[in-house]
Each structure stands twice: as structure tokens, then as C-alpha cells.
Amino acid sequence: MDHLRRFVVSVAGGLVLAKDVSRYREAIASFGVAALNAKFAVLQDISNVFLVQPSALKSLLDEGPLSRLDRPTLQAFVQMREDSRSSSLVRQFIS
């Protein structure tokens, strides 16, 4: 998660990230460790933060694995979206 907070991510970058995390998640699932599966489910949802339309972002943040993360953590990921400043996403969905 810390690594993802270092880079601004475009939609194209989000697609690559989602694909990579999906493959990592498949590999981790083969280990049969529930805690690791849960962590990679959260990473998969974080990668979706960079893909969804602004109108769908609130439901992604408020439902599923991401709803268990604290607001400052979620805000950090939303800020890394390429369109976060132009669309005021942080103020609209996190505040």
C-alpha cells in the first residue's frame, strides 16, 4: 500500500495495476493463507480506486474491504488519481 501512495496513477496505469494485482492475488491464493487473501482483496479494491468513474467512487470506498480502512488512508489513494485535483474528488468523497 505504501508503494501505491508514491505515484500519481492514470486510468491506463490503473488498468496495468489492476491486472498485476489480480495475478499476484491468484498466486497468493495458491498458498491457502486466509490473511494473505484478505490483504490482496484490499489491494485489488485499491487498484479499482484508479479505474472507477468519479460517480462510482463513493460506493467503492464505503462498501466492501475498503470500508474498513481509515479515511486518511483512503484519501491518500484518491489523491493519487490523476484526475483528483481537477474533479475535486478528495473533497467530494472523503470529507
Image: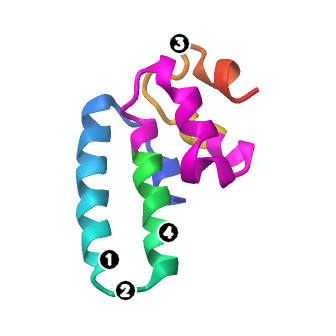
Disc 2 element = loop
Q: Which mark's residue is nearer the viewer, 3 or 4?
A: 4
Q: For the residue marked with disc 2, what is the amino acid?
A: Gly
First along the sequence among labels 4 and 2 = 2
Task: Compute the Cα span from label 3 to label 4.
Answer: 31 Å
Q: Provide residue 23's location: percent of width, then percent of height.
A: 23, 64
* Residue tagged 1: 29
User: Real-space Cα distance between discs 4 and 2?
Assistant: 11 Å
Q: Earlier in the sequence, mark 4 or mark 1?
A: 1
Q: Nearer the viewer, residue 72 or 29?
A: 29
Number of the front mark, 3 or 2: 2
Q: Verify CB contact (< 8 Å) between mark 3 and mark 2.
A: no
Instruction: Return the residue nearer the eye: 75 or 63.
Output: 63
Query: Image quadrant of residue 7?
Result: top left
Please name the residue shown 43% across and 73% down the image: 37
Q: Secondary structure at mark 3?
A: loop
The magenta region covers 48-74
Q: Residues within 10 Å of mark 1 (few under 14, many from 20)?
A: some
For the residue pair 59 and 27, the one nearer the viewer reads as: 59
Question: Is 15 situated left or right of 90 in this image?
Answer: left
Say which label, 3 or 1, has the lower sequence index: 1
The three-letter code of the residue at mark 4 reads: Ala
The residue carrying mark 4 is 38
In this view, 24 is above or below 68: below
Which residue corresponds to mark 2?
Answer: 32
Q: Quadrant of residue 74?
A: top right
Q: Is residue 50 left or right of residue 6?
A: left
Query: Label 3 belongs to which residue?
Result: 87
Q: Quadrant of residue 83?
A: top left
Q: Is residue 32 above or below residue 42?
A: below
Three-letter amino acid code at the position of disc 3: Ser
Q: Is residue 71 magenta?
A: yes
